[in-house]
Image (cartoon, rainbow, N blue to C red):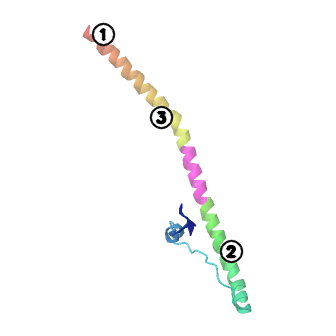
Amino acid sequence: MGEGKDNKPVEVDTSSIKQTAEDVSILNKKPWSSPKSLASNLRELPQLKREQMNHNTRFKVMQSNIEECKLNLLEKEPVIKMETLKVEAEHKHLNLVTACIQF
């Protein structure tokens, strides 16, 4: 919770913050209650590391795909600008020809 202008607590909707695009498990903090909990957590640690590595790998793949799309767009931009200039020049030429014909 944060504080508003009047120093009263402000509710924050954390459920919408925790939503993700895919079904991704969200790690929640667990209370430490006994040595058995520690042993249980130690058994879970390798699985959590694997999940984190999978998430990191997917993120890097998605980031790479985005960068590739950006490069493709940057490569197409000058071609499109050149075509636009050609069309504009042709349009001006046709307008000039039309104006000459009318006289």
Three-letter residue code for mark 1: Cys
Q: Earlier in the sequence, mark 2 or mark 1?
A: 2
Residue 51 pos. (x, y %): 63, 73
Three-letter residue code for mark 3: Ile
Residue 88 pos. (x, y %): 41, 25
Residue topped by disc 2? 49
Residue at 61% from the left image edge and 54% from the top image edge: 64
Residue topped by disc 3? 80
Residue 48 pos. (x, y %): 66, 77
Residue at 65% from the left image edge and 71% from the top image edge: 52
In the image, which residues are magenta?
Answer: 61-72
Query: How many residues crowd mark 2 within 10 Å: few (<14), some (14–19), many (20+)?
Result: few
Q: Is residue 40 above or below residue 63?
A: below
Closest to the observer, 53 or 30: 30
Quadrant of the frame with the N terminus: bottom right
Closest to the observer, 97 or 33: 33
Q: Is residue 79 above or below residue 8?
A: above
Residue topped by disc 1? 100
